Image: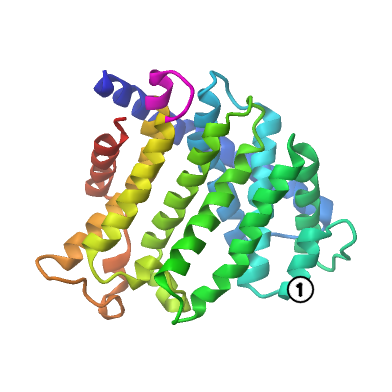
Amino acid sequence: MYLISFIKSIGGLTIKTFWGLKKSEQWATAYLHTIEDSFQGKFDNKTKDKIVKRYSIQQHFINDSFSSLLGRNNNDREKERNLLYFIMVSVYDDFFDDKTLTLDQIDAIFYHPETYLAQTFFERVFIYTHIKLLNDVADKAQYFKDFEGLHIAQKDSLEQFNPQISDEALLSITTRKGGYCLLMCRHYLETPYLQQADATWYALGGVIQLTNDLYDIYKDMQEGIFTLAVRAKKQEVIYALYHQHSQALNNTIRQLPVSAARKIDLSIILNVIAAFGYVALDNLKNLQGSNATLPKFETLARKKLIIDMEKNKNRYKLLKFTYQNAAL
């Protein structure tokens, strides 16, 4: 039965990838143009591409999957909120990454958007999306608490430029950033609230952030950012940490108050996401080979640390790791 469910879920995912994603990207691109016209500014092409792709992937692979737990599809209002979220957090991230605002200014625009005097296109866009989403969700108090959790984690992440930061602090920042990012998104759905699902959203966010760090080792080193992946000395140690969080995600799925069939469908889709991390860990295993430790990453060419998911061997690994880990 598991094999049949696996083939069915992967088949549906393949259809979404080749048809649904393109349609969503076209709609999101057109929506961004309306935002630019409304607030008299422009997103750079890199930001547009990031917003459109992240929105489309999350909409189809995550939000749709959680709604399917209760036998429904996302409506247009839910899809719009999801896109507004990615517009908002992309601009928000740039406040930190590009240092366009001081920390005091970021606090002010976050906590008091109604009274903040916007000076730029990006500030106007953040205020609009922040207020609109806050007014749109059902549980405003919990939503703001979750966003504040991300806000605190984002400020804490500035310590990742400090070579003395501890591994414990890195793990806390990583899981909180990823966890609250995803937990915010459950508020955009109109499905009946499932308290147990909050743990799944949060755990998935942590796995996604750990995965991103595994794929960004080279980039983060160039920018002087410390992550657990950058710090990795032994493949088996970073593998054990990642596997622990991946299995914790599966444990949250087991606790959901839905049918076994719907649990396994969700597990297969979410474990596709986790499998990207296992592909990156397999690359580290190959780099370590028979040695006791990984090579020093700074001595490696960029191509050694980049995972090309266009290669068929990596796509095969993705399916293999998904199948191995999705069974509940």
Name the amino acid type tagged 1: Asp
**Image position of 84 with respect to 167: above or below:** above
**Image position of 282 with respect to 193: above or below:** below
Residue at horizontal 82%, vertical 55%? 39
**Image position of 257 with respect to 42: above or below:** above
Count of labels in the image: 1
Viewer-side residue, 265 vs 175: 175
Q: Residue 46 location in percent, x, y? A: 57, 61
Q: Residue 21 location in percent, x, y? A: 51, 37
Quadrant containing the N terminus is top left
Q: Is residue 101 visible?
A: no
In this rendering, would 49 be left or right of 222?
A: right
Q: Residue 91 location in percent, x, y? A: 68, 60
Q: Quadrant of residue 102?
A: bottom right
In this rendering, would 135 be left or right of 194?
A: right
Viewer-side residue, 246 vs 16: 246
Q: Is residue 28 visible?
A: yes
Q: Report the colour scheme.
A: rainbow
In this rendering, would 187 be left or right of 14?
A: right
In this rendering, would 41 be left or right of 324?
A: right
Residue at horizontal 9%, vertical 66%? 290
**SS for tag 1?**
helix
Residue at the left extreme of this rendering? 290
Magenta-colored stretch includes residue 56: no
Q: Which region of the structure is painted magenta? A: 255-264
Q: Residue 116 location in percent, x, y? A: 87, 63
**Image position of 32 with respect to 154: above or below:** above
Question: How packed is label 1: few (under 14 Cα within 10 Å), some, or many (20 or more)?
Answer: few
Q: Can you identify the residue that label 1 sits on?
A: 104
Quadrant containing the C terminus is top left
